[in-house]
Image (cartoon, helix red, strand yellow):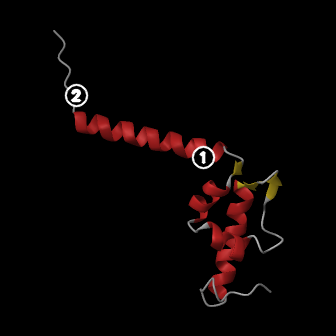
Amino acid sequence: MIHIELNEEEMKEIYIKMVEEKLVDLEAETFFLNSKQLQKFVGIGWNSITSHLMSDPNFPAIRLGNKWLFPRHEVEQYMKKYYQAVRDSGGDIIKYKRK
C-alpha cells in the first residue's frame, strides 16, 4: 500500500509562488500601459504624472483617441534616468527642474 502525506501549508506556499511568478511573466508581456497601469507602475497619481512626467516632451507616451498609452520598457528606462536626475538635484521631485 502507498501512503501519501501532503502538507497543506507547503502546498499553498508553492501555489502562491507559482501564481506570483506567472503574474510577473504576464506583466512583462504587456507592451503598453494604460493610465491606471502607469500610476501603479510608477507609484504616483495621475496629477503628479501629468505635471512632473508628461510635461517632458521626451516622456514616452502616445494617444489613441482620448486614451493615453505608455510603452512599458521605455517608461522603465525613462524613470531610471528621471530618478537619478532628481536624486542628483537634491531628491525632491517638486523642486526638480529639468535641464
- Identify which amino acid the numbered label 1 is placed on: Glu
The N terminus sits in image quarter = top left
Would you name the residue on which mark 2 appears? 6
State the mark number for residue 62.
none
Where residue 27 sits: x, y (%)? 60, 46
Q: Quadrant of residue 71?
A: bottom right
Q: Is residue 3 left or right of residue 43?
A: left
Q: Dot 2, crowdedness within 10 Å: few (<14), some or many (≥20)? A: few
> In terms of depth relative to the viewer, which is nearer, 18 or 34?
34
> In terms of depth relative to the viewer, which is nearer, 46 or 42?
46
Query: In the image, is residue 23 above or below residue 48?
Result: above
Determine whether the residue tagged by mark 1 lies in a helix, strand or loop. helix
Q: Is residue 63 left or right of residue 85?
A: right
Q: Quadrant of residue 36?
A: bottom right
Residue situated furthest top in the rendering: 1
Determine whether the residue tagged by mark 2 lies in a helix, strand or loop. loop
Instruction: State the residue at coordinates (59%, 86%).
Output: 91
> In terms of depth relative to the viewer, which is nearer, 10 or 16?
16
Q: Earlier in the sequence, mark 1 or mark 2?
A: 2
- Identify which amino acid the numbered label 2 is placed on: Leu
- Mark 1 vs mark 2, CA separation in Å: 32 Å
Query: In the image, is residue 89 above or below residue 31?
Result: below
Q: Dot 1, crowdedness within 10 Å: few (<14), some or many (≥20)? A: few
Q: Is residue 65 left or right of residue 85?
A: right
Query: In the image, is residue 90 above or below residue 18?
Result: below
Q: Nearer the viewer, mark 1 or mark 2?
A: 1
Query: In the image, is residue 2 above or below residue 50?
Result: above
Where residue 61 sits: x, y (%)? 78, 60
Would you name the residue on which mark 1 appears? 27
Q: Quadrant of residue 11?
A: top left
